[in-house]
Every structure is written in C-alpha cells, then in structure tokens.
Image (cartoon, rainbow, N blue to C red):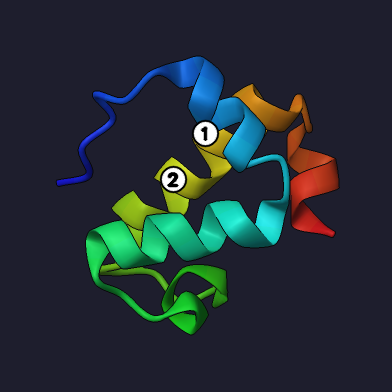
Amino acid sequence: MLDLSTDMTAVKKEMSDIRRIRAVVCKGYKVAEEAITSTRRGRANEPRNMSIYLTMHLRGDNLEEIGR
C-alpha cells in the first residue's frame, strides 16, 4: 500500500503535474502506467482510484478534466 505520511504541502508542490502524479502512484504500487490508464477492469483499480483521488485533491480537476 502507498505511504501517504509525508507533509501534504510538500506533496502538493511536487505533484502539480498529472503525469507526475501517475508516475508516483505507479511507482508506489509497483504497476506500469499503462495498467492504470487502460479501460480494463481488474487488478489496477486501487492505483487508478488513488491517481484520480490525488489529481482531484491536489490539482482541483474534476472527473471530466481527468478523463481527457
């Protein structure tokens, strides 16, 4: 599981780019980036959901913007 115990202010500065968010989540969960961007259901749901959650809360994007 991904460790989110770091200071959120530092995380917000570091992760303002959606590509960076995806890369960090993939590294933390040890999955390929293609696994969380594909439409296939299954094993990669938790990393994908974490990536969406962080993007929404760190960048303020809504689901429509994330899906583009």
Q: Residues within 10 Å of mark 1 (few under 14, many from 20)?
A: some
Residue with the mark numbered 2:
49
**Foreground: 12 or 52?**
12
Is 13 located above or below residue 65 in the figure?
A: above
Find residue 40 and report its horizontal and vertical position in percent.
Answer: 46, 77
**Foreground: 65 or 9?**
9
Q: Quadrant of the C terminus?
A: bottom right
Find residue 36 and report its horizontal and vertical position in percent.
Answer: 47, 68
Quadrant location of residue 16? top right
The residue at 69%/52% (across/down) is 18
Residue 32 relative to residue 17: left or right: left
Residue 44 relative to residue 21: left or right: left
Quadrant location of residue 67? bottom right
Q: Amino acid at mark 1?
A: Tyr
**Foreground: 22 or 15?**
15
Q: Amino acid at mark 2?
A: Asn
Task: Measure the C-alpha gap from mark 2 to mark 1.
Answer: 6 Å
Q: Are marks 2 and 1 in contact (CB under 8 Å)?
A: yes
The residue at 66%/62% (across/down) is 19
Does dot 1 land on a helix, a strand or a loop? helix
Q: Residues within 10 Å of mark 2 (few under 14, many from 20)?
A: few
Residue 1 relative to residue 29: left or right: left
Is 54 located above or below residue 23 in the figure?
A: above
Find residue 50 and report its horizontal and vertical position in percent.
Answer: 42, 42
Residue with the mark numbered 1:
53
Does dot 2 land on a helix, a strand or a loop? helix
